Image: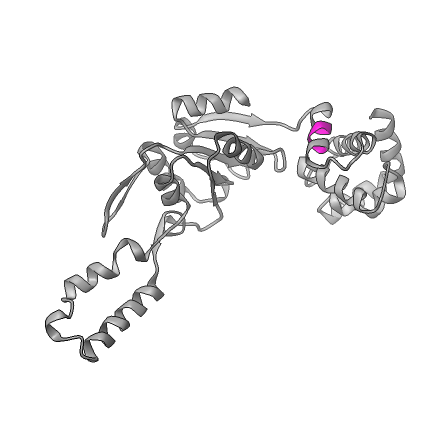
């Protein structure tokens, strides 16, 4: 992962990260921003997102207020000679003060910056094509203001949960990295780092139980985020070790589908915990 991030920075190429939900793709962008001392600018993709929601928009309410204020000033004796011409007033309305920067434009105007395009697989084909154009030269043209070009291209992380295939054209523009679930030792280290109040014993037991859950045929196998949630829930209940009763009570922290909870119940939570304790 470190090599992929380094090459992405050295070659000024976006880094395309794929993997199951909860393996730490978004956390990678946060860690990169911390390492660079740069702000993280996040674009959350979703079905139906378009250019105006990702790039920029005009603040129409403020423009309307400005127009009414100009009209009122003209009527209250500002003087016809000093009244703005229609062209001048239009230029005022479409000036930088009324432009609302969305994540993509903010990333182009901020140096340095880390741009996170999160869950790009949720967007549609048209937005992918638009995104490819932006990431090719980090330049955008605003008809009313001109061309905005990044002085220094932002570091770009794109993430995908593989809910659908992302087009090859976008992938070719990027470096590719697959994130898998971490090893047992690495996941215990993550839990201990993020939740230092959790004992080493409890962190190992929870991690062992989660990793065994991932091997079961679940609708949504738990990720690292769920491991942290489960450990935090047990910690809130004052647990010092993983026990069947507490595991059952806090199962909603790690399994977020009713069908998955029923499946684990049928397989007996006690057996799962005892196997996890032995394995951990």
Q: Is residue 143 above or below residue 70?
A: above
Queried whether the magenta region covers residue 189, the answer comes back as yes
Asked which quadrant contains residue 110, the reply is top left
- Residue nearer the viewer, 82 or 58: 82
Task: Check the picture and name the quadrant holding the N terminus.
Answer: top right
Report the coloring of the rendering: one colour
Q: Residue at x 38, y 44 (%)?
A: 106
- Residue nearer the viewer, 263 or 122: 122
Which residue is at the far bottom?
A: 76
Classify residue 225 as left or right of residue 246: left
Queried whether the magenta region covers residue 96, the answer comes back as no
Residue 59 screen position, x and y as percent: 35, 60
Asked if one can make out residue 218 in the rendered structure from this viewpoint, the answer is no
Q: In the rendered structure, which segment of residues is drawn in magenta? A: 187-191
Asked if one can make out residue 71 in the rendered structure from this viewpoint, the answer is yes
Q: Residue at x 19, y 75 (%)?
A: 74
Residue 105 screen position, x and y as percent: 36, 44
Asked which quadrant contains residue 180, the reply is top right
- Residue nearer the viewer, 31 or 56: 31
Task: Check the picture and name the quadrant holding the C terminus.
Answer: top right
Residue 95 screen position, x and y as percent: 25, 56
Classify residue 60 as left or right of residue 184: left
Q: Is residue 233 above or below residue 87?
A: above
Would you say the magenta stretch is mainly helix, strand or loop?
helix
Residue 43 screen position, x and y as percent: 46, 44
């Amino acid at each position: 992962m470190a090599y992929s991030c380094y090459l992405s920075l050295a070659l000024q190429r976006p880094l395309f990260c794929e993997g199951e939900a909860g393996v730490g793709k978004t956390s990678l962008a946060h860690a990169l921003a911390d390492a660079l001392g740069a702000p993280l600018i996040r674009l959350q993709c979703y079905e139906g997102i378009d250019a105006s929601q990702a790039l920029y928009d005009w603040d129409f309410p403020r423009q309307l207020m400005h127009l009414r204020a100009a009209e009122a000033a003209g009527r209250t004796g500002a003087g016809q000679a000093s009244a703005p011409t229609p062209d001048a007033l239009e230029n005022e309305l479409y000036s930088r003060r009324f432009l609302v920067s969305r994540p993509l434009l903010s990333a182009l105007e901020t140096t340095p910056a880390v741009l996170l395009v999160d869950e790009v697989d949720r967007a549609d084909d048209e937005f992918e094509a638009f995104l490819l154009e932006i990431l090719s030269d980090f330049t955008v043209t605003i008809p009313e203001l001109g061309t905005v070009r990044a002085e220094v291209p932002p570091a770009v992380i794109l993430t995908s949960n593989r809910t659908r295939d992302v087009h090859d054209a976008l992938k070719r523009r990027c470096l590719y990295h697959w994130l898998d679930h971490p090893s047992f030792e690495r996941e215990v280290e993550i839990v201990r780092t993020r939740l230092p109040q959790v004992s080493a014993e409890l962190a190992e037991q929870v991690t062992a139980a989660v990793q065994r859950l991932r091997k079961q045929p679940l609708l949504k196998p738990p990720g690292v985020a769920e491991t942290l949630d489960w450990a935090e829930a047990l910690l809130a209940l004052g647990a010092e070790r993983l026990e069947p009763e507490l595991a059952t009570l806090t199962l909603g922290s790690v399994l977020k589908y009713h069908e998955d909870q029923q499946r684990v119940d049928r397989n007996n939570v006690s057996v799962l915990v005892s196997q996890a304790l032995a394995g951990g």
